[in-house]
Amino acid sequence: MSYEKNLTQIRHKPLKLSRFERFNSSKVRKIGKSVHHCRKCSRTRGIIRQFGLLYCRQCFREEAERLGFRKYS
Ligand SMILES: [Zn+2]
C-alpha cells in the first residue's frame, strides 16, 4: 500500500511517528472475536478454547492425534 512509503519517511521524525502510531494503529480489543485466534493459522472462526487449546476446528482435526486425543470430529 501507499502508506509504507510514508512509514520510511516518518521513521526519521520521532514526533510524527508517535502521532502516526497513536491515531492510525488498530484498536486493541478486550472482547469480541478478534481476541482469540488460531495459534496455527490465525483464523478467528471456530476456535476451540477448551483446555486452552486455541486451535481452530480445522487445525484441531489435524493436530488432535499428536496432542493425544482419541476421539475427535
Ligand atoms: Zn487454524
Image (cartoon, rainbow, N blue to C red):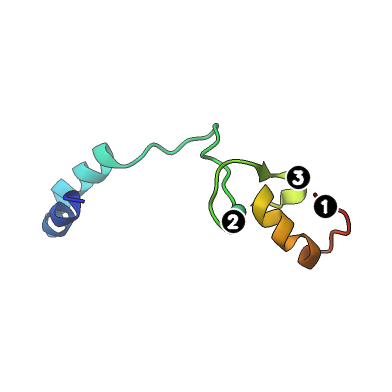
Give the residue number, with chain letter if any, for mark 3.
Answer: 50
- State the residue at coordinates (18%, 49%): 3
Give the residue number, with chain letter if any, for mark 2.
Answer: 39
CB at mark 3 closer than 8 A to ligand 1? no
Give the residue number, with chain letter if any, for mark 1.
Answer: 72
Quarter of the render that holds ligand 1: bottom right
- State the residue at coordinates (78%, 64%): 67
Q: Nearer the viewer, residue 19 or 52?
A: 52
Q: CA distance from mark 1 to mark 2?
A: 19 Å
Q: CA distance from mark 1 to mark 3?
A: 13 Å
Tally the numbered discs.
3
Q: Quadrant of residue 48?
A: top right
SS of the residue under disc 2: loop
CB at mark 1 closer than 8 A to ligand 1? no
**Mark found first going from the N terminus, 1 or 3:** 3
Q: Nearer the viewer, mark 1 or mark 2?
A: 1
CB at mark 2 closer than 8 A to ligand 1? yes
- In the rendered structure, the answer to whether residue 10 lies left or right of residue 65 reads left
Q: CA distance from mark 3 to mark 2?
A: 14 Å
User: Mark 1 touching mark 3, by CB under 8 A?
Assistant: no
- In the rendered structure, the answer to whether residue 58 lies left or right of residue 20 reads right
- In the rendered structure, the answer to whether residue 22 lies left or right of residue 42 reads left
| Residue furthest top as drawn | 31
Q: Position of residue 33 (x, y in %)?
A: 55, 36
Q: Position of residue 5 (x, y in %)?
A: 14, 56
Amino acid on which the number 2 mark rests in the picture: Arg
- In the rendered structure, the answer to whether residue 16 lies left or right of residue 32 reads left
Q: Nearer the viewer, residue 53 or 27?
A: 53
Amino acid on which the number 1 mark rests in the picture: Tyr
Amino acid on which the number 3 mark rests in the picture: Gln
**Mark found first going from the N terminus, 1 or 2:** 2
